[in-house]
Amino acid sequence: MTEVQEMKIRDAAAQAAQAAEGLQDVQGEKMVLNMGPSHPATHGVLRIVLELDGEIITKADPDVGYLHRGDEKIAENMTYTQFIPYTDRLDYLAPLANNVAYALAVEKLLGIEKDLPPRCQYIRVICAELARISSHLLGVGAFAMDVGAMTVFLYIFTEREKIYNLAESLSGARFTTSYTRIGGVMRDLPPGWAEQCRKFLKEVVVTIDEVETLLTRNRIWVDRVRDLAVISKEDAIDYGLSGPNLRGSGIEWDLRKAQPYLCYQDLEFDLPIGSVGDCYDRYLVRMEEMRQSVRILHQCLDKIPGGADNKTNEPINVPDGKIVLPTKPSVMTKMEELIHQFMLVTEGVNCPPGEIYFGHENPKGELGFYIHSRGGGTPYRMKIRAPSFVNLSILPKIFPGCLISDTVAILGSLDFVMGECDR
Amino acid sequence: MRIVEVCEFAKKELGFDYLVDISSVDNYGEDPRWTMIYHLRGLVNHCELRLKTDVSEEKSELPTVTTVWKTANWHEREIYDMMGVRFRGHPDLRRILMWEGYPYFPLRKDFPLAGKPSELPGVAFTKPAPLEGGPFVSVPGGKDAIEREPRVRTPED
């Protein structure tokens, strides 16, 4: 008597591919489908040319560049300080983190990244982590919405609104913050800001819990994203993934831990890593990273030198008149400061010749700046290593074999932003 | 041009398994004109390595490292797009940020910031929409301040 054993393959795409194999002779010709550049699930202007065999993708060719503004060319033609507003527009879902990354890169070129006042370092960490929460909230929310869970999107937007209010009282702008300066930050925390921030942290944890209740064990959600677009450890490294996408594939790598900058070595936080490398793992990693960011923010607000309202008058800028603008009253009354102000505004911060690369753990991955300086106030060449650009290059590898309805889930799980990808 | 061998050695023997980035510099007016910069990283040993190689303007070509790291694919396409340096053996050397058929290489130092006109039809440009009135409409070149300042206007005004 023969024993019949049924093997169940959980992966919907693999099932479909298997079914298609049995139908070799009834297969028709391939169809080419153009997705984007204006498609609600491509989060901006990504275009993907898909080759389909029925509902199964056989080939994918991403076409980027619809949002190319030539930021690297622009950077060569202006001073280091003038480029700060352009960094807002790279990853426009986390402008505060981009500001921090860029300022740190230029400070590394100047050789002052270790001399930053402690208060400035804490403020910058607060900025970067708020940006991380904001970006991950939207990443998860948009991912869920694309797969059909509309409610999550509405919940997370309520929380993001609070982050924008915090950014507004911090920098004066909700979206295009331009908060950092070379050698410091634009201004100190406004009175009462730390309390507002603590209140927000209490509320955002509730929302994260609610989102988890809605999604993590939701049968529909799990069926849609589990075992989908599995990225192995080897592939993740080979394609240069970074950030939550790299950690989702089970690689314990975070620049905040591996090459601690600012005051990250004084802060306690854990790195969530995935076990399978599928879309579900990338979602879980983002959820946990938000909780860890909340943890970091609580520590920062408790430990910030000078306290919330800076009673002891801790400096927030490096004490170097050739890097940081002097205060307005001193410009009006002192000769030296007047000269510094004039030189900084007209010529920019005078950087030494040399070249540096600085990588910052941005919400989307490693945002790196390679600056090649030949002296003077403008860079000779600035290359921006955008995480979304590199993360998207894996699409031709993971799309084939998936169903067409999976594309939106995969794109959502990679969490990219085209402003940064196209630069 | 032994960049591939060097990269393979760095990856296999020295443990630099992660390619962070490839950049390019245009040393305009100097010889050799191009410098390629490879940023490597070892995820296990936490080391970073910067490799640089020069390419002359006449040649403007060097071997691809896509055989060592897949991520080099898009980086090299970007360098080809922006600087016009070709990569020998690249599987798919097309423009990536600019559109197919664009005639210039915009990150070269002899390319002006304002750009150059190309022969392509103005696909990205449309005629300005006719002024349909609204709450903040100003009339450019108006004869006095009342004309010029933004205020509520209907199409007849």
Image (cartoon, coloured by chain):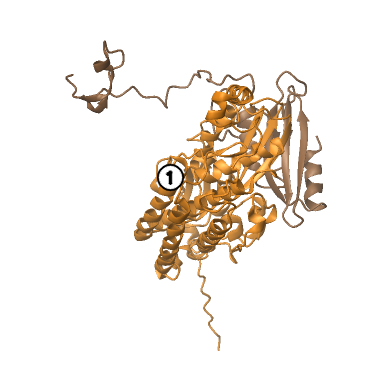
- The residue under the point 50% across, 57% down is A402
Tell me the colour chain B is drawn in.
brown
Instruction: Kindly state the secondary structure of the residue where label 1 is placed.
Output: helix
In the image, B38 versus A338, the foreground residue is: A338
Residue B20 appears in the figure: yes
Left or right: residue A279 versus residue A266 is left
Q: Position of residue A354 (x, y in %)?
A: 74, 32
In the image, A277 versus A332, the foreground residue is: A332
In the image, A117 versus B12, the foreground residue is: A117
Using the image, name the chain to which the residue with label 1 belongs. Answer: A
Q: Quadrant of residue A117?
A: top right
What is the residue that sits farthest to the left in this orientation? B156
Q: Position of residue A387 (x, y in %)?
A: 58, 46
> Compared with residue B86, is residue A347 higher up or lower down, i.e. above or below?
above
> Compared with residue A272, is residue A86 higher up or lower down, i.e. above or below?
above
In the image, B18 versus A102, the foreground residue is: A102
What's the residue type where badge 1 is placed?
Ser
Q: Which residue is mark 1?
A: A169
- The residue under the point 44% across, 22% down is B121
Q: Position of residue B41 (x, y in %)?
A: 73, 49
Q: Position of residue A245 (x, y in %)?
A: 57, 55
Tell me the colour chain A is drawn in.
orange
What is the residue that sits farthest to the bottom in this orientation? A1
In the rendered view of the protein, which quadrant contains the C terminus of chain A? top right
In the rendered view of the protein, which quadrant contains the N terminus of chain A? bottom right
